[in-house]
């Protein structure tokens, strides 16, 4: 099956979810059905089967399939956790817009169409995510996002135009290659939130609904990285030895992002801000991997991006469940939470393990390979230590879980499942051989809603456990992530005319 | 470089200048329309007819969305530079772009595209950085995206058909996002103002 059914299902689902966002029940049904159908269509898509568009073939690569699959599955679980807490109407539509746009961006050969597609998708997904309800904070965040996405797209296009794929790497002059490298690296750094371009990440975490954050902070930036990594090492790589200080600038940005991002994550009190700054510090890994211009570094970053997307979805889902359970997302107001939510505690440990990993695990090896491709000696040591910042931030959250619970925490609902009295009575009646089965079953069916209402907290905890499992699987290289990341991209679309001599 | 290419490039540059410099929202939208519609003609060779038509239709659609977004725009939010200065900037950048390849800028495409791209870039950047109005910001963002596409044609040569198609679709998507921003701004503030600007920070509400 080609890419077309996936695109059709995702686009239709997004349109339906946008149209029904004002209706709680119908919107939930349409949104969840759309995401599930898109996931199914993605699974059925055969990598490499072409879809003719504009005289050129568009196809799904194995890597795009695994990245989008993990993004959609993680996003769906976060939406489910969020739906058990509150109704964030724009979540499903944002996920579907991002998935369909990224399928095009990663399915067209070449950096320029990819940048155009991922830039437009970023703008559209942000508009869908923030548009409803309109508040001054969201207007400001959307304006910032549109500015950033368009500027990054224009800068990226300029960078690629200075050193197009078609002319081959060795034909690029060193000065031009250096300029293109810095421009593309800064565009990529901005989309990921590298320091000092990290303001968008913090503002988005303040303004956007939590359920869209995995898309806006992880999945879409990953798309930008894949597009630019498909171009830079092949085109600029041969000129890398003669590129001067330009490459060093990006290495400094990457190192500063890792170190300062860790500090920033450690001083935040708001859990969503902590998650946002873990994204910022991980931007350092991407910028460093990009700056290496080494195909090995590219493969490492591509492999690392999939567990990155999964672990960030799991972290956001965890925060949504925590906030719903305790009524706060502030660490200072949640001392002793571990006693009331041990399942969330175990999930957080699993998410931490999936984020950082250990030697032999894909996420650890890939991150280390990306850092090694760009740095050596003391710089590598600093980068390696700082890249463990997410684990430290998670340990800090866990640390506040110990101690005597604050009154707010002690009053929170526990994670044990409860059964309504009516349902228990119905179960007893069913065990009685002389009972009226039909009437009992009808009475039991009326207890389904109370059962759901009473067990929102355990259900959220269960979904977070599944999210943590997904993150752990991605971190250990399940779904063929390693092979997919090492696989080739689609060939660049052939220009209308071959390039003449300048 | 033919006269047709230069004329099309000049029209694109002129349109970009009007789009970002005009006081009236309607004139600005018409400028954006001219800037977007003439882009397919600033290429050598010209794109195939269906591809070029798609790009023109995409440009018309994007300009229409901008026109709708600017229904509540006021003259006060226009560029403080004014139309004559903006047009002069566009003209200067266009001429500089035309001459840039003559003094050594490596370029595989027509100089007119480089000139038009530079003109769009020069007039779009100031409002992208400082605009506090959703419509003015949006129109500058579309002109900026157009600048990227023109410079790509000028520096790297004629674009493949797929790229033209994706570029047209991207412009329409961007214009749709801008329309959403304008709608949000009207709902949240009663006008097209983007809250939280430098002026508001200096003078916090009592």
Image: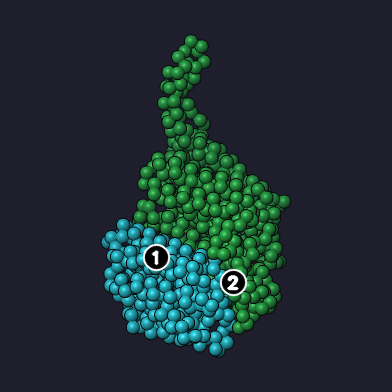
Is disc 2 surrounded by few (<14), some (14 to 19) or many (20+) residues within 10 Å?
some
**Residue at position x 43%, y 86% in the image:** B92
Q: Quick one: B162 or A225, which is closer to the camera? A: B162
Which corner quadrant holds the C terminus of chain B?
Answer: bottom left
Taking the view exactly as shown, the residue that stands out farthest to the bottom is B103
Q: Position of residue A456 (x, y in %)?
A: 47, 36
Q: Is residue B187 above or below residue A179?
A: above
Residue B61, disc: 1
Residue A70 appears anywhere in the view: no
Q: What is the distance, in whole Å, between disc 2 and disc 1 at their CAs?
A: 26 Å
- Residue A384 sits above or below residue A338 on the image: below
Chain represented in cyan: B
Q: Which residue appears at 49% of the width and 34% of the height?
A: A414
Q: Which residue is mark 2?
A: A495
Residue at (35%, 55%) from the top-left corner? Answer: A134
How many marks on residues?
A: 2
Chain A: colour as depicted: green
Closer to the camera, B109 or A173?
A: B109
Q: Secondary structure at mark 1?
A: helix
Visible residue check, residue B39: yes
């Amino acid at each position: 099956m080609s890419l077309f059914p996936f695109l059709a299902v995702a686009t239709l689902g997004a349109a339906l979810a946008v149209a029904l966002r004002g209706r709680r029940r119908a919107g939930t049904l349409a949104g969840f059905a759309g995401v599930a159908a898109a996931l199914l269509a993605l699974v059925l898509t055969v990598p490499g089967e072409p879809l003719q568009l504009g005289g050129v073939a568009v196809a799904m690569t194995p890597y795009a399939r695994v990245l989008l699959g993990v993004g959609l599955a993680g996003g769906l679980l976060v939406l489910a956790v969020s739906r058990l807490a509150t109704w964030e109407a724009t979540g499903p539509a944002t996920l579907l817009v991002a998935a369909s746009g990224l399928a095009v961006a990663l399915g067209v050969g070449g950096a320029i169409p990819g940048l155009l597609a991922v830039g437009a998708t970023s703008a559209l997904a942000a508009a869908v995510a923030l548009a409803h309800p309109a508040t001054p904070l969201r207007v400001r965040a959307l304006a910032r996002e549109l500015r950033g996405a368009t500027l990054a797209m224009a800068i990226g296009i300029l960078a690629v135009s200075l050193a197009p794929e078609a002319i081959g790497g060795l034909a690029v002059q060193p000065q031009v290659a250096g300029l293109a490298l810095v421009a593309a690296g800064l565009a990529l750094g901005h989309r990921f939130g590298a320091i000092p371009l990290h303001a968008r990440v913090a503002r988005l975490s303040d303004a956007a609904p939590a359920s869209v954050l995995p898309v806006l902070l992880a999945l879409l930036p990953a798309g930008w990285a894949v597009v630019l990594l498909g171009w830079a090492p092949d085109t600029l790589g041969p000129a890398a030895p003669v590129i001067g200080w330009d490459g060093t600038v990006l290495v400094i940005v990457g190192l500063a992002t890792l170190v300062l991002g860790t500090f920033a994550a450690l001083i935040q009190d708001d859990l969503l801000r902590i998650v946002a700054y873990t994204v910022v510090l991980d931007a350092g890994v991407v910028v460093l991997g990009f700056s290496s211009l080494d195909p090995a570094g590219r493969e490492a970053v591509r492999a690392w991006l999939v567990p990155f997307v999964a672990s960030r979805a799991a972290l956001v889902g965890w925060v949504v469940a925590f906030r719903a359970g305790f009524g706060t997302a502030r660490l200072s107001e949640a001392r002793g939470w571990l006693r009331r939510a041990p399942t969330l505690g175990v999930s957080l440990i699993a998410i931490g393990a999936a984020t950082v990993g250990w030697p032999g695990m894909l996420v650890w090896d890939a991150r280390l390979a990306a850092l090694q491709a760009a740095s050596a000696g003391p710089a590598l040591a600093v980068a390696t230590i700082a890249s463990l910042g997410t684990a430290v931030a998670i340990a800090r959250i866990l640390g506040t879980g110990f101690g005597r619970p604050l009154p707010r925490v002690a009053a929170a609902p526990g994670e044990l499942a409860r059964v309504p009295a009516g349902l228990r009575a119905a179960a007893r009646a069913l065990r009685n051989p002389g009972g009226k089965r039909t009437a009992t079953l009808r009475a039991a069916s009326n207890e389904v809603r109370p059962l759901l209402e009473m067990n929102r907290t355990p259900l959220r905890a269960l979904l977070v456990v599944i999210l943590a499992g997904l993150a752990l699987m991605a971190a250990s290289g399940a779904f063929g992530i390693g092979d997919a990341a090492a696989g080739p991209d689609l060939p660049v679309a052939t220009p209308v005319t071959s390039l003449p001599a300048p | 470089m033919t006269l047709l290419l230069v004329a099309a490039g000049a029209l694109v540059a002129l349109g970009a200048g009007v789009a970002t410099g005009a006081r009236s929202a309607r004139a600005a939208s018409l400028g954006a329309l001219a800037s977007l519609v003439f882009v397919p003609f600033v290429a050598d060779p010209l794109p195939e007819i269906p591809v070029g038509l798609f790009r023109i239709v995409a440009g018309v659609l994007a300009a229409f969305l901008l026109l709708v977004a600017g229904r509540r725009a006021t003259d006060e939010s226009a560029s403080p530079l004014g139309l004559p200065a903006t047009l002069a900037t566009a003209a200067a950048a266009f001429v500089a772009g035309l001459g840039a390849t003559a003094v050594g800028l490596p370029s595989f495409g027509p100089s007119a595209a480089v000139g038009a791209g530079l003109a769009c870039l020069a007039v779009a950047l100031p409002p992208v950085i400082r605009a506090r109005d959703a419509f003015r910001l949006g129109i500058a963002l579309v002109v900026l995206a157009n600048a990227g596409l023109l410079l790509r044609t000028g520096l790297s040569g004629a674009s493949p058909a797929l790229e033209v198609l994706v570029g047209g679709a991207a412009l329409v998507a961007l214009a749709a996002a801008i329309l959403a921003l304008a709608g949000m701004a009207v709902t949240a503030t009663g006008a097209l103002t983007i809250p939280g600007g430098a002026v508001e920070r200096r003078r916090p509400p009592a």
